[in-house]
Image: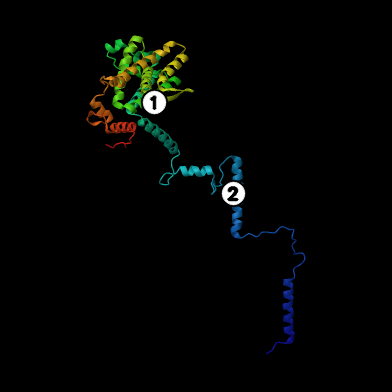
């Protein structure tokens, strides 16, 4: 059954009118391009904006009041300083160290380096330097007058009171700490190490024993309660006589080695402004020459070398078996003799 034409026409007209109304926008509804757009937020974005607004207001109020902020500190960015600190504050296992552990490790490393250098000094020179430091510290604690009464060389107390430490303390006391004390301690270390390295520990012990004995007798006659400066000069004299023509630097001059003890004596006299300052150097030169003559010169002219340490000291201190010279010294002397003759020879070869 067909619908009437009038009804079909009415339906077509209604559809066309609806389409035209949907496509046409009223003039009042058009938006100017210069007007700001209205942003439509979703539910999640609107919630985040509200939280951000409330948090900013709360942080501002806390900042004005002086309280802590709710904003989290520490992002992903870091400075070079903070990165280096984080790297150095990690242990080997990756865990964070305590704040004081880095400073403690630096102190431990400095102390360990100092102890390593101290242990590297030759044994007899190390003992001598330690005694010099101990006697100086004792002098500071007791005071000048009491220190001289306890440490100075006194023949009456040595012989009748059996205060046998006095010759040793008289050979170790360099006076109160000063620039002169520091220079004398350095000379003692330098010359003592050279002698002990050249002669051996046992021979160096015999050398020191002879110097303390001779200088104690001279100190009694010349009224010298301390003679550590004389021991240093005797060491320098023996070294200078062993290689007299070697050029050395002294102040701004280049002089032969044998003149160095006299140069030091002249400089001390000029600094003190008194000729009595030369007496310790004169005694040291005499004491050193006594040893050098009987050890090096007298055997060459037919005399006997009586300045030989006992066999047990050489075995104990130098590690020489059988009391004779060590194989290392023999190989060195043989190599030097062969070099003088013009034919080379390796160390340790027969």
Position of residue 325 measured from the top left corner of the image (x, y, whole percent): 26, 29
Q: Of the numbered discs in the image, which one, if any, rests on residue 156? A: none
123 and 29: which one is in front? 123
Q: Quadrant of the C terminus?
A: top left
Which quadrant would residue 64 be assigned to in this image? top right
Choose top left, top right, bottom left or bottom right for residue 49. bottom right
Measured from the top left, where is residue 137 in percent x and y?
A: 38, 21
Relative to 6, residue 232 above or below = above
Q: Position of residue 288 (x, y in %)?
A: 34, 18
> Which residue reaches farthest front?
342
Q: Which residue is mark 2?
A: 55
Residue in the foreground of this view, choosing between 38 and 79: 79
- The residue shown at (60%, 42%) is 63
Residue 72 or residue 233, whichever sits in front = 233
Horizontal side, residue 282 vs residue 78: left or right: left
How far across and down, in percent of the image, does residue 103 sit?
Answer: 44, 36
Distance from disc 2 to disc 1, alpha carbons, whole Å, reads 73 Å
| Residue for badge 1 | 190
Q: Is residue 69 left or right of residue 241?
A: right
Could you say whether the residue bearing mark 1 is in a helix, strand or loop? Answer: helix
Give the answer, above or below, for where 13 lies relative to 190.
below
Give the camera-side residue of 311 and 70. Answer: 311
In the rendered image, which quarter is residue 149 located in?
top left
Q: What is the residue that sits farthest to the right in this orientation? A: 27
């Amino acid at each position: 059954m067909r619908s009437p034409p009038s009804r079909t026409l009415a339906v077509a007209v209604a559809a066309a009118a609806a389409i035209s109304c949907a496509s046409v926008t009223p003039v009042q509804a058009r938006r100017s391009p210069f007007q700001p757009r209205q942003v439509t937020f979703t539910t999640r974005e609107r919630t985040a904006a509200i939280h951000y607004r409330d948090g900013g207001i709360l942080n501002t109020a806390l900042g004005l009041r002086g309280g802590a902020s709710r904003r989290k500190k520490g992002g992903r960015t870091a400075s070079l300083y903070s990165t280096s600190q984080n790297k150095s504050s990690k242990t080997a296992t990756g865990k964070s160290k305590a704040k004081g552990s880095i400073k403690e490790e630096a102190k431990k490393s400095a102390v360990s380096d100092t102890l390593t250098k101290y242990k590297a000094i030759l044994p007899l020179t190390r003992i001598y330097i330690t005694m010099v430091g101990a006697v100086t510290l004792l002098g500071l604690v007791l005071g000048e007058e009491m220190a001289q009464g306890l440490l100075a060389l006194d023949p009456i107390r040595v012989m009748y009171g059996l205060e046998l430490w006095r010759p040793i303390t008289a050979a170790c006391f360099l006076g109160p700490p000063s620039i002169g004390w520091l220079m004398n301690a350095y000379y003692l270390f330098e010359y003592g190490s050279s002698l002990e390295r050249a002669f051996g520990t046992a021979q160096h012990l015999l050398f020191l024993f002879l110097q303390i004995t001779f200088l104690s007798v001279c100190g009694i006659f010349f009224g010298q309660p301390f003679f550590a400066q004389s021991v240093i000069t005797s060491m320098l004299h023996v070294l200078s006589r062993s290689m007299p023509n070697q050029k050395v630097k002294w102040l701004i001059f280049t002089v032969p080695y044998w003149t160095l003890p006299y140069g030091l004596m002249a400089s001390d006299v000029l600094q003190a402004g008194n000729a009595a300052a030369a007496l310790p150097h004169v005694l040291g030169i005499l004491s050193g020459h006594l040893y050098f003559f009987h050890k090096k010169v007298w055997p060459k002219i037919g005399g006997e070398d009586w300045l030989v340490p006992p066999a047990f000291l050489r075995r104990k201190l130098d590690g020489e078996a059988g009391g004779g010279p060590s194989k290392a010294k023999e190989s060195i002397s043989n190599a030097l003799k062969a070099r003088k003759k013009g034919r080379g020879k390796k160390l340790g070869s027969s």
